[in-house]
Amino acid sequence: MQAQAIMTTPVITIDGAAPIADAADLMLSRKIRCLPVTRDGAMVGIITEGDFLRRQELGTQRVRPRWLEFIVGPGKMAREYVLANGRRVDEVMTSDVVSAPPGASLAEIVELMTRHDIKNVPIVDAGTIVGIVTRTDLLRALLRILPQSGATTGDDELIRKDILAELEGQAWGDGTLIGVKVDKGVVELSGAIFDERQRKAAVVAAENVKGVKEVKDSLFYAGPLSMVLVS
């Protein structure tokens, strides 16, 4: 799935010359957490809720001891002053925007969010913002894909084979040690595990197989594998 399939569009934007009060009001009224910033139709930055945290009006501007100010340096101190006191959107926005093209995969979008610790990725095509992918958009996409409750029970033997195949395909799982029984879509897992974290992983693996109604955990914790004696 690509970004263009789940992105929010059209995108609400704001001009860089607008007062920050307009940006805050727009974000609150439209219930959004960020605003791409444009100039002459091109995206030049982004302003988010986080840009309003360190404000002089709130008394939340960053304050450091004098000795630490010397270490931080005048450049960073000047930037922090602008963020705490700036009146225009283009004074407090983030200019170095992390964006992606419409054809980016969801895996690439999530990687960008994780690597840069951001919650929104603008989708840009030839310099023009055409959409934005937020964590909410990813959640909506996931909801559309997840199986709905009440799904029809499939063939028990087919379910059993699918579960075993999933377990055997995982580095943490071993289908020869975990037994699987299926009765009218109700799965019972039995056998030995050597790490308690394998228990939840095995249950999740079974739950994700089509046709499974319920998973019963009868797994036995045998202790760390390194402690098992081979006769």
Image: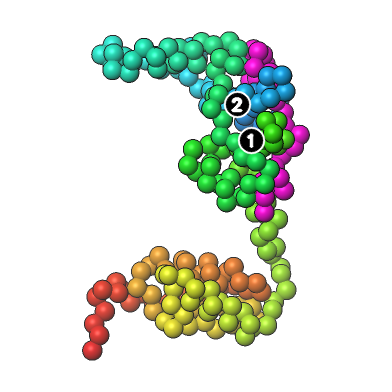
Residue wearing tag 1: 122
Horizontal and vertical percent for residue 17?
A: 65, 13
Residue wearing tag 2: 46
Horizontal and vertical percent for residue 211?
A: 66, 74
Q: Is residue 189 above or below residue 85?
A: below
* Residue drawn where x is 50% and y is 16% of the image: 83
Q: Is residue 82 above or below residue 227?
A: above
Q: Residue furthest right?
A: 10
**Looking at the picture, which amino acid does disc 1 mark?**
Pro
**Looking at the picture, which amino acid does disc 2 mark?**
Ile
Q: Residue furthest bottom?
A: 231
Element at badge 1? Answer: strand
179 is within the stretch colored magenta = no
Left or right of 58 in this view: 109: right
Res 26 visible: no
Marks 2 and 1: in contact by CB < 8 Å?
A: yes
* Residue drawn where x is 66% and y is 60% of the image: 146
Residue segment shown in magenta: 1-25
Left or right of 32 in this view: 118: left
Compute the Cα span from label 1 to label 2.
9 Å
Horizontal and vertical percent for residue 181?
A: 55, 83
Query: Picture quarter containing residue 208?
Result: bottom right
Q: Is residue 90 above or below residue 163?
A: above
